[in-house]
Amino acid sequence: MKLQKIFVTIIFAINLIGVLNFIHQDAFSEQPKIKTLIIDGDNNHNWKGTTPVLKKILEDSGRFTVDVISLKKVENNYVVAAVSENLPQNLINNDFNNIFDKFDLVVSNFNNHRGGSWSDATKEAFEKFVKNGRGFVVYHAADNAFREWKEYNKMIAIGGWGNRNEKDGPYLYINNEGKIIRDDSKGRGGSHGKRWTFTLTNQTPEHPVMKNLPAKFKQTVEDELYDLMRGPAENVTILATAPSKDTKRHEPILLAIDYGKGRVFHTALGHDVPQIQSPAFVITFLRGAEWAATGKVTITPQKNLENETE
Ligand SMILES: [Zn+2]
């Protein structure tokens, strides 16, 4: 058992080294690091597995420092259950509405899939944080969270599950003629077919996140292709799409949203640990996170991505 554990750890470490070789780490030393907070603690996904990998991807890029708070549900509200080593222990068992101002960027790996919500004070503080010009990254099932929180849905533009339907806003996608469609028709929000290695199309090569990335690149680890996503879809730029076998639409997979003076990067990629170690995830996540925090991207596109087409 113990040997097996060591073996798994070594394999994991080798994998991660492999992924991080895709990143160029030059020229970051003069820039202040982006202070990042990852929020997790509840999710219908493997947050315990994915958060340490997200943290390592960000830190090893040389561009970010990362702290983590893990939440737990107490009655109908979420409070802090655990904090990473550099955060004050007295946050534990308390609300976290005062924490955001210490950071440039929040990454959500959180989904309140069992109901319950953040306190009104925390929601307001978080809205202010983004509205006043900070960054937010919505990662995979974080776009399933908070159907009832209007401002959150504006931040993420589109979401899925949690009983979302036509009342939450239009479906957003690109049709076969390349036209952006906002479709008010009735129906569920959020679905995905069997996992597969789909190809992403770069829809906005002029956007800082997508600039100099290939016109097409592949998610090389079988992943969920989120489709039928719907929401307010305001102030949103579709950065990349993938073709759903079920809807026959080009579904938005990477999005950039303006919220007040703040910026939101939304990635629907990355169901579990293997999926977030792929070049397509790592590169777009790092560039999206840097853009959300600063409005600029200095993390160099890696060459391997160009070979990841079909
Ligand atoms: Zn998933």
Image: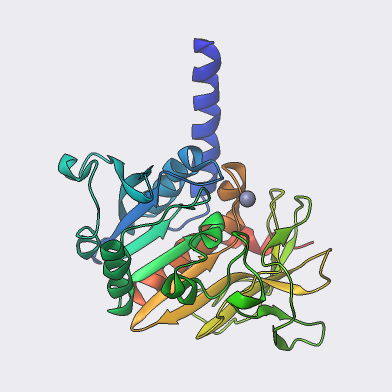
From where the camera sits, is residue 144 visible? yes
x, y percent for residue 172: 66, 79
Asked if residue 193 lies left or right of residue 164, the reply is right
Asked if residue 177 lies left or right of residue 134, the reply is right
* Residue at screen point 68% across, 75% down: 215
Q: How is the image coloured?
A: rainbow
* Residue at screen point 67% across, 63% down: 190
Say if 4 sits above or below 120 in the image.
Answer: above
Asked if residue 26 lies left or right of residue 204, the reply is left
* Quadrant of image for the N terminus: top right
In this rendered view, identify the residue nearer to me: 63 or 53: 53
Say if 48 sits above or below 230 in the image.
Answer: above
Asked if residue 132 lies left or right of residue 157, the reply is left
From where the camera sits, is residue 297 visible? no
Q: Quadrant of residue 304?
A: bottom right
x, y percent for residue 144: 56, 59
Say if 31 sits above or below 72 in the image.
Answer: below
x, y percent for residue 69: 31, 47
In this rendered view, identify the residue nearer to me: 205 or 271: 271
Q: Quadrant of residue 126?
A: bottom left
x, y percent for residue 115: 49, 52
Q: How many marks?
A: 0
* Residue at screen point 55% across, 73% down: 255
Outermost residue to the front: 75
* Quadrant of image for the C terminus: bottom right
